[in-house]
Amino acid sequence: MAEASPTTPHAAPKGATAFTHTTTSRRFSELLGTLAQAIVAERDIAHIWSHDPAFRDWRDESELLWQRAAEEAAAVFDGPVLRPADRVLIRAARILHYALGCERPAEYDAAVADLAACSESLALRRENAVTGRTYQLLRMAEARLAEIGDLEMIPTASDPDLQDGLDDWPPIAC
């Protein structure tokens, strides 16, 4: 007669949940994908003459992707809250939506700081698969926001011509 052994050790935590998407987390994930596409499209047209007719389709596609990203961000924060982690994603979507409309360095820098604060607050309590995955989504959002800053579409604090008024913009609370 063969001996059987359990596949899960007896000391393993019971009831560990797996991550499943809610409407909000799925929309947020799609928002990150759209932002990635918009960033790539913007990089494609970064060094072209803006009135070159050969690149008009590329320029139009880039503009449409940025508009779609803003619409998707709005759809995230209009979505339902089905679990506590959704609230954090909604706040992050609000920050990303705000950042897409930034015109001043202080606005962009405040958005970067506030998004980082959201990630840090969630990092302290990664006790299950849901908060762990939400933390990963927030880290990806931070990376996308940094890539947007690298595109130089939004003026940042490192621009020497725009050092005036960096401290007069209030941060968005997460």
Image: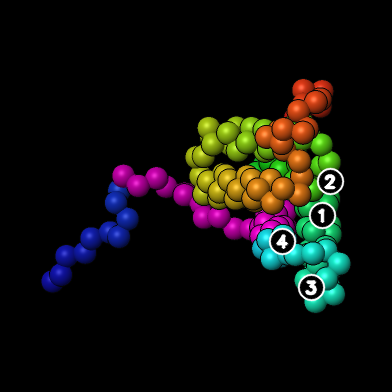
Foreground pick, 87 / 6: 87
Image quadrant holding the N terminus, namely bottom left
Q: Name the residue under label 3.
A: 55
Q: Name the residue under label 1.
A: 70
Question: How far across and down, in percent of the image, does residue 113 sit?
Answer: 67, 33
Q: Do the residues labelled 2 and 3 touch (CB within 8 Å)?
A: no
**How far apart are the alpha carbons under marks 1 and 4?**
24 Å
Q: Name the residue under label 4.
A: 47
Sequence-wise, which precedes: disc 3 or disc 4?
4
Vertical relation: 53 (above or below) 115: below
Judged from the image, the secondary structure of the residue bearing numbered disc 1 is: helix
Foreground pick, 85 / 13: 85
Q: Are marks 1 and 3 in contact (CB under 8 Å)?
A: no
**How far apart are the alpha carbons under marks 2 and 3?**
24 Å
Sequence-wise, which precedes: disc 2 or disc 3?
3
Question: How far across and down, in percent of the image, does residue 11 sit?
Answer: 31, 44
Vertical relation: 38 (above or below) 145: below
Report the magenta residues as a range: 11-39
The amino acid type of the residue labelled 3 equals Phe
- Does residue 60 appear left or right of residue 82 in this picture? right
Mark 3 residue crowding within 10 angstroms, few (<14) / some (14–19) / many (20+): some
- Does residue 18 appear left or right of residue 26 in this picture? left
Q: Name the residue under label 2.
A: 101
Judged from the image, the secondary structure of the residue bearing numbered disc 4 is: loop
**How far apart are the alpha carbons under marks 3 and 4?**
11 Å
Residue 156 lies in what quarter of the image? top right
- Does residue 116 appear left or right of residue 87 in this picture? left
